[in-house]
Amino acid sequence: MMTNLFSAFDPATSIKFSMNWVSSLLGLIIIPSSFWLLPNRMTMMMTNILFKLHGEFKMLMGVKSKGMTLLGITLFMFILTNNLMGLLPYIFTSSSHLTFTMTMALPLWLSIMFYGWINHTQHMLAHLVPVGTPALLMPFMVLIETISNLIRPGSLAVRLTANMIAGHLLMSLLGNSSINYIEYTSVIIIIQMSLMLFETAVAVIQAYVFSVLSTLYASEVNYENTQKSPMSFSSS
């Protein structure tokens, strides 16, 4: 019986060292499966997913995006592995902590901003004012766009954390209530199975959203791609 509902998200296992964070690195052991696993349906499915993601990220980044799609694919696989491992029993859900998500979002956003402001300063300044904005509204638009850029790492981190915490809290509540309401155990188990399927979909979707938004933010600072692309990608 848990004394606190949020005790399932407690990363501390000992006073000196927290072993729960080691679960975030377990995926690195099994990801290079081509070195030790024969080709099967699982590896073929993963290969197709990676090629689909590569094509989509390449379309978002533009023509001059050699090697940049690897960043989005790596983010997707890393977050997806940790999200799915968190659904298994007795495995620490690292993606439900801001320490984990902010560590990915903040350095990524800072590197994108530094690259854009150092290499394409005029383009970054022009991006603060959308095309067709009246002169009277330009100061307000600069303020709004600046705030929108500053909250991007926070929105990436909080979105992933909140979605992972919400599902785990629901499953914890249902698991605790099944002890008190034994006559409704079968109904609660069916609800938990449905919720587990829903959480699996959320784990995949949140990994995809994080990687796509990161790719969109990176595409905005690339002046050559935005000049050639007929679409303007702006997301906050």
Image (spheres, helix red, strand yellow):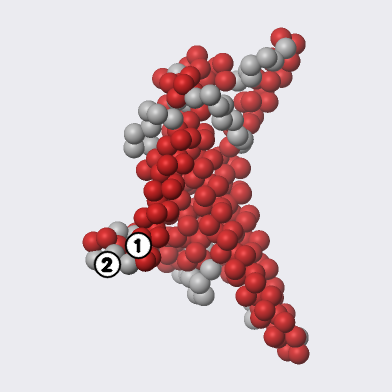
Q: Nearer the viewer, residue 84 or 231?
A: 231
Amino acid residing under circle 2:
Leu
Q: Nearer the viewer, residue 26 or 20?
A: 26
Q: Residue at x 52, y 35 (%)?
A: 216
Neighbourhood count class around disc 1 (C-alpha, 10 Å): few under 14, some 14–19, many 20 upward: some
Marker disc for residue 152: none
**What secondary structure is found at the residue carrying circle 2?**
loop
Compared with 219, 192 (above or below) is: below
In the picture, which quadrant includes the C terminus? top right
Q: Residue at x 29, y 65 (%)?
A: 39
Q: Earlier in the sequence, mark 1 or mark 2?
A: 2
Q: Residue at x 38, y 65 (%)?
A: 42
Q: Is residue 35 left or right of residue 122?
A: left
**What secondary structure is found at the residue carrying circle 1?**
helix
Is residue 17 in view? Answer: no
The answer to the question of whether label 1 and label 2 lie on touching residues, with beta carbons closer than 8 A, is yes
Compared with 145, 169 (above or below) is: below
**Quarter of the rendering containing residue 129:** top right
Q: Where is residue 118? Give x, y as percent.
A: 42, 20
Residue under circle 1? 43
How far apart in space, not on screen, are marks 1 and 2 (Cα)?
A: 9 Å
Residue under circle 2? 37
In the picture, which quadrant includes the N terminus? bottom right
Q: Residue at x 56, y 16 (%)?
A: 126
